[in-house]
Image (spheres, helix red, strand yellow):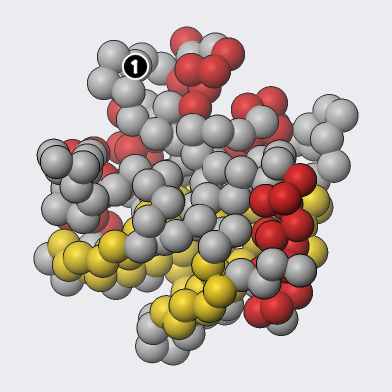
C-alpha cells in the first residue's frame, strides 16, 4: 500500500513527482495525508483534505457529489469517516485547526476558512469504531517541535478516543516519529521527496526516494 505525505500537486513539478511515486511503487491503492491539490489519480487513493486544497472539490466529495469543472478520479475523501482498505480500517480527519473557528458549524465556514475542521467533525470521528490507521493533517502533541510543541490537542483527543495502531500525519513535511499511548505516530516527508509503502499485515512503513524523472 502506497503512503504519501503532502503533495501540493497544483505545481507541475510536484505533480510529476506525485505520479512518479505511484509508478515506482506499483501499488494498487494509496493513503495520502492532505494538501493533495490534484484529484485525477492513477490508483484508488484515500485522502484527507489539508489546509491547501481545491475546497470546492473537497466540499463536493464531502457531500458525495461530482465536483463541477474538475477531473476527479480515484480520489476518496475521508472526512470524519472510515473505509476498509486492504483489510485495514482507515479513518481520517479533514482540515487543520483554527481555535477561533473550532466551535463554529461547518455550514458557517466559507471561502478559505473551509480548510479548518470544527468540533462537530472531531466529535463525529470519535464515534467511528475499530480504527487501525488514522490520517490527520495536524500532529498530536509530542511529535513536532519548532522551538515549541507544534502539536494539536484535538488530535490528542482523537488518539485517546480511537486508539489506532498507527497515525499518519501530514502538514509539517518532515519525517518524525513518536509513541502516543499504544499508537505509533509518523509524520511524513512530502511526496516530492519520499514515498512510503505500508505493509497491511504488520503496519511497518518502508521509505523510498521519489524518482526525479
Q: In which quarter of the image is residue 105?
A: top left
Q: Where is residue 200 in the image (x, y as percent from the top left)?
A: 47, 83
Quadrant into which the N terminus falls: bottom right
Q: In this view, does 90 lie above or below 148?
A: below
Residue at the image point whose x is 85% and y is 42% from the top: 71
Front-lying residue, 125 or 193: 193
Q: Position of residue 156 (x, y in %)?
A: 19, 48
For residue 82, say whether it is visible. Answer: no
Q: How many numbered discs, if any?
A: 1
Quadrant into which the C terminus falls: bottom right
Q: Position of residue 104 (x, y in %)?
A: 36, 15
Q: Is residue 147 above or below residue 210?
A: above
Front-lying residue, 179 or 122: 179
Task: Name the side, left or right, on which 89 lies relative to 64.
Answer: left
Front-lying residue, 210 or 70: 210
Task: Name the side, left or right, on which 33 lies relative to 125.
Answer: right
Mark 1 sits on what residue?
101
For residue 111, say whether it is visible. Answer: yes
Q: Position of residue 117 (x, y in %)?
A: 40, 30
Q: How crowded is mark 1: few (under 14 residues within 10 Å), some or many (20 or more)?
A: some
Residue at the image point whose x is 51% and y is 73% from the top: 196
Task: Name the side, left or right, on which 12 lies relative to 125.
Answer: right
Residue at the image point whose x is 45% and y is 35% from the top: 95
Amino acid at each position: 500500500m502506497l503512503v504519501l505525505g503532502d503533495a501540493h500537486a497544483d505545481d507541475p513539478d510536484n505533480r510529476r513527482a506525485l505520479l512518479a511515486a505511484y509508478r515506482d511503487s506499483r501499488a494498487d491503492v494509496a493513503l495520502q495525508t492532505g494538501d493533495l491539490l490534484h484529484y485525477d489519480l492513477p490508483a484508488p487513493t484515500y485522502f484527507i483534505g489539508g489546509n491547501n486544497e481545491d475546497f470546492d472539490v473537497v466540499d463536493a466529495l464531502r457531500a458525495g457529489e461530482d465536483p463541477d469543472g474538475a477531473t476527479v478520479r480515484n480520489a476518496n475523501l475521508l472526512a470524519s469517516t472510515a473505509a476498509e482498505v486492504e483489510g485495514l480500517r482507515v479513518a481520517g480527519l479533514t482540515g487543520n485547526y483554527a481555535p477561533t473557528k473550532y466551535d463554529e458549524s461547518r455550514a458557517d465556514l466559507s471561502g478559505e476558512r473551509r480548510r479548518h475542521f470544527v468540533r462537530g467533525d472531531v466529535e463525529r470521528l470519535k464515534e467511528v469504531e475499530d480504527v487501525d490507521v488514522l490520517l490527520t493533517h495536524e500532529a498530536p502533541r509530542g511529535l513536532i517541535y519548532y522551538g515549541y510543541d507544534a502539536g494539536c490537542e484535538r488530535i490528542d483527543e482523537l488518539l485517546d478516543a480511537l486508539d489506532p495502531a498507527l497515525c499518519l500525519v501530514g502538514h509539517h513535511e518532515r519525517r518524525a516519529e513518536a509513541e502516543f499511548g499504544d499508537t505509533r505516530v509518523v509524520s511524513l516527508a512530502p511526496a516530492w521527496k519520499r514515498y512510503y509503502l505500508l505493509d497491511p499485515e504488520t503496519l511497518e512503513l518502508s521509505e523510498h526516494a521519489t524518482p526525479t524523472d
